[in-house]
Image: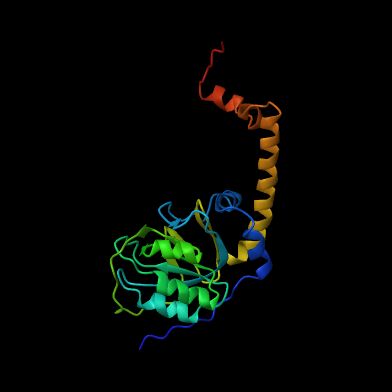
Amino acid sequence: MIRVSTKFSRPAPAPVERLGAYSSATIHEAQGRLGALDSAVKPVDHRMSVCGPAFTVQCAPRDNLMLQTAIAYARPGDVIVVSAGDYPEAGSFGDVLANACQAKGIAGLVTDTGVRDTEDLRALGLPVFSRSVSIKGTVKETVGPMCEPVTVGGQLVRPGDVIRGDADGVVVVRREDAAEAAVASQERVEAEEGYISACRAGKTVIDMCNLAPLLAAKGLAIDEE
């Protein structure tokens, strides 16, 4: 018998909500360029956006038995994160399972395998991030871990870590770092707003980023007109 537990610590709601206000790229940069899933993992609709604690599950390639199990046990607000061998040739999630997620209040799904029924997924609006789109069906044969650390898109994701996904991709924030990452993200936003204002005021990016010494050190000489 394989026994799994669905008990794990979720982050406090406040920092999760704050992180949801920042882009995946901003959070990635703000936490030291950490946590970005492989660029192949993208939303099925660029308007999709999600932020919530990870409910992790391990599936065998072309097998969605444990994904269906995870949907049954995830809580409202959770983001189901599926590690399925980084296998693109399987449509392991579609309109039926998406409706099941939405009915339970699940915030979204991130998977390193394929999904299908993408027109229905877009119409439903459940945020779905996948490695691929594939019409190929799956089996229901293999049981495996749930609510244990998994590797998805080259990143370790633990149950309760914060998942932030948007048009550009997906980033993971360790649950104990959520509050600090939110503060750092706000600081980065404010810094970037300053750069944009300076650009509009006539400064160059060389001026703003103090690139002249670096370019000179690398031997670049520019003859101006």
Is 91 situated left or right of 8 in this image?
left
Q: Determine the residue located farthest toward the bottom in the rendered image.
A: 1
- Residue 130 position (above or below residue 7): above
The residue depicted at 63 percent of the width and 32 percent of the height is: 209
Which is nearer the eye, 55 or 219? 55
User: How far across and down, in percent of the image, does residue 79 sit?
Assistant: 52, 69
The residue depicted at 52 percent of the width and 77 percent of the height is: 103
Is 100 situated left or right of 61 in this image?
right
User: Can residue 191 be seen at all in this image of the molecule?
Assistant: yes
User: How far across and down, in percent of the image, does residue 205 sit?
Assistant: 61, 30
Quadrant assignment for the C terminus: top right
Quadrant assignment for the N terminus: bottom left
User: Can residue 147 be seen at all in this image of the molecule?
Assistant: no
User: How far across and down, in percent of the image, does residue 204 sit?
Assistant: 63, 27
Q: Determine the residue located farthest toward the top in the rendered image.
A: 225
Is 186 situated left or right of 115 in this image?
right
Is 58 situated left or right of 167 in this image?
left
- Residue 183 position (above or below residue 162): above
Marks counted in the figure total: 0
Which is nearer the eye, 37 or 176? 37
User: How far across and down, in percent of the image, does residue 29 sit?
Assistant: 57, 48
Which is nearer the eye, 53 or 1? 53
